[in-house]
Amino acid sequence: MTKNELRTCFNKARQDFVLSLNFSQITVAIQNVQSRLVDARLLSGTIGGYAAMTSELDPAPMFGIFRDNGHSIALPWFTDRSADMTFKMLDGPLERGPFGISQPSPENDMAEPDTILIPLVAADGYGNRIGQGQGHFDRYLAKSRKKRPIVAIGLAWECQIADQLPADPWDQPLDFIATPDRFIKVTS
C-alpha cells in the first residue's frame, strides 16, 4: 500500500475505534498514556504538545500534570499556511491558526521543546510514522536534531500501530510511542 492508502485506512480505523468509546473510556485511556509518559521518565524541560484534531489522542488533559512536575508546555504555531512550524509557549487562550487548528497567541514567547509529543495516523515499532501528509513535524525535527538532542514521542491508539510502514528519506523517526496499552521503545 502507498502512504496515502495507509493514511486513509488508519484514519478510518482510528475514527471507528474512538467513536466506539464513551467519554469515561477516553478519559481512562488518556490517563493511562499520561502514566506511561511520567513513568518512563523521558519528559524533560519544555514539552511540545499539540492541539488534537478529530480522533487523535489528545494530550491536552495531561498538560496540568506535566506542569505540576515542573515542565513548561509549548504548542505548534504557524504564521500562515506556507510557513515552517515553530513552537510557542502555551500561556493563555488559544486562537485559530491558519490550518484551523488551535494555537497559542502570536504574542506568546517562542519555545524550543526538549521533548515533543507527536500526533500520528500510524506508526510502527521501528519509529516510522505516517502523519497527515504535510511534513511539518518531520521538517521541525530534522532542523532541531541538527542543533540539539530532542526526544520524539508519538501518541497513538493501539489500532494505529502497524507491523511495518514505508519510510521516505526525509521522514524523521520517533524515539518512542505511547498508547493507552503500552510504551514502545522503537528499534532501529
Image (spheres, rainbow, N blue to C red):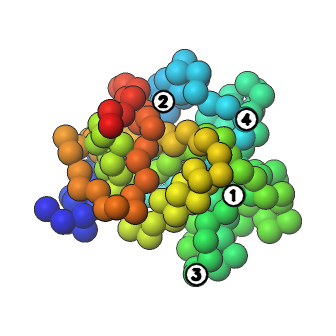
Q: In the image, is residue 177 above or below residue 28?
A: below
Cα separation between marks 4 and 3: 29 Å
Question: Mark 4 or mark 1, which has the lower sequence index?
Answer: 4
- Dot 1 surroundings within 10 Å: few (below 14), some, or many (20 or more)? many
Residue ID at (36%, 34%): 186
Q: In the image, is residue 37 above or below residue 92?
A: above
Q: Are marks 3 and 2 in contact (CB under 8 Å)?
A: no
Question: Mark 3 or mark 2, which has the lower sequence index?
Answer: 2
- Dot 3 surroundings within 10 Å: few (below 14), some, or many (20 or more)? few
Residue 137: give x, y in percent of width and height.
51, 59
Residue with the mark numbered 2: 33
Residue ID at (45%, 66%): 135
The three-letter amino acid code for the residue at tag 2 is: Val
Q: Are marks 4 and 3 in contact (CB under 8 Å)?
A: no
Residue with the mark numbered 1: 87
Cα separation between marks 4 and 1: 14 Å
Residue 124: give x, y in percent of width and height.
28, 42
Work out which residue is located at the far top of the displayed protein and give it. Answer: 39
The three-letter amino acid code for the residue at tag 3 is: Ser
Residue with the mark numbered 4: 45
Q: Secondary structure at mark 1?
A: strand
Report the mark closest to the observer, 3 or 2: 3
Residue 32: give x, y in percent of width and height.
47, 25
Residue with the mark numbered 3: 82
The three-letter amino acid code for the residue at tag 4 is: Gly
The three-letter amino acid code for the residue at tag 1 is: Phe
Camera-nearest residue between 109 and 100: 109
Image quarter of the N terminus: bottom left
Image quarter of the C terminus: top left
Residue ID at (80%, 68%): 106
Q: Report whether 81 appears left or right of 4.
A: right
